Structures are given as C-alpha cells and as structure tokens.
Image (cartoon, rainbow, N blue to C red):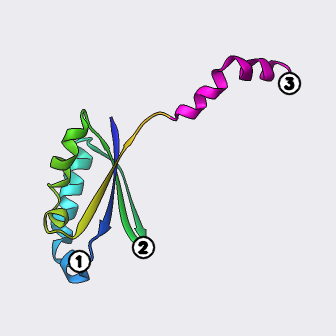
Amino acid sequence: MKVQTILSPTSQARREDFEKLSVAEERVVWQHYTQGRLRELYFQADPIRVVLVWETADLSQVPDLMNTFPMIRAGLFQVETIVLGPWVPILALFRDDVKAEAGRS
C-alpha cells in the first residue's frame, strides 16, 4: 500500500526547534529510506510542507512510522495522511461506449 503523509509546521514550532533536531531527524529519514519503507520525499519552502511517500503493508503502520521522527514527537509538525490508490477514472476508457467511439475515429 502506498501512503502519502503531508507534514505542516504547527503554530508553536520555531526555527530553533527545527535546527536542534535536524540531524536526528535526517538519521530517521535515512533509516526509513534505506529500509525501503520511505519511497519518496519532497520539501516545499513557502509555505513549508514536507511530503513523504511510504510503502506499507497496512495503514495502521503509519502512526508508528511517523512517531519515529523527533520533530513529530516534539510537536513541531501536524500530519495529514492520504492513502494513494489507482486512478479510477481511467476505467472510463474501457466502457463499451468509449470503445465504440474510439473505433469510429
């Protein structure tokens, strides 16, 4: 299962708090990445957002994964979780009326 987490700074988060935990945070990122759980990671500067894409067997694993991050444990980020699935609208290509219309082109 592919899961995306979007991390946004909480209102009480300060730059100094992030700086103190940055090395410890990156060690956790590296650990998850090298173990194949963390597949993709992205950063947006303005407004600050971090996007992590996970490969998990079960959605229930995500809170435990997120709680391994020092910045999340310190309350610096709020987390939004999105389960990524197949692009369902593409099924329209395989409906009979769409096939018939494509055959007339």
Please tell me whether the stretch drawn in magenta is mainly helix, strand or loop: helix
Nearer the N terminus, badge 3 or badge 2? 2
Lateral position of residue 83 relative to residue 67, left or right = right
Residue 78 image offset from top left, x and y in percent: 26, 63
Element class at badge 2: loop
Residue 3 image offset from top left, x and y in percent: 33, 43
- Can you tell which quarter of the image residue 48 is in? bottom left
- Can you tell which quarter of the image residue 80 is in? bottom left
| Label 1: how many Cα within 10 Å (few below 14, some 14–19, many 20+) | some
Q: Which residue is mark 2?
A: 47
Lateral position of residue 89 relative to residue 72, left or right = right
Q: Which residue is mark 3?
A: 105
- Region rendered in magenta: 87-105
**Label 3 amino acid?**
Ser
Q: Which labelled disc corresponds to residue 13? A: 1
Residue 34 image offset from top left, x and y in percent: 24, 46
The span from disc 1 to disc 3 (Cα, nearest Å) is: 58 Å
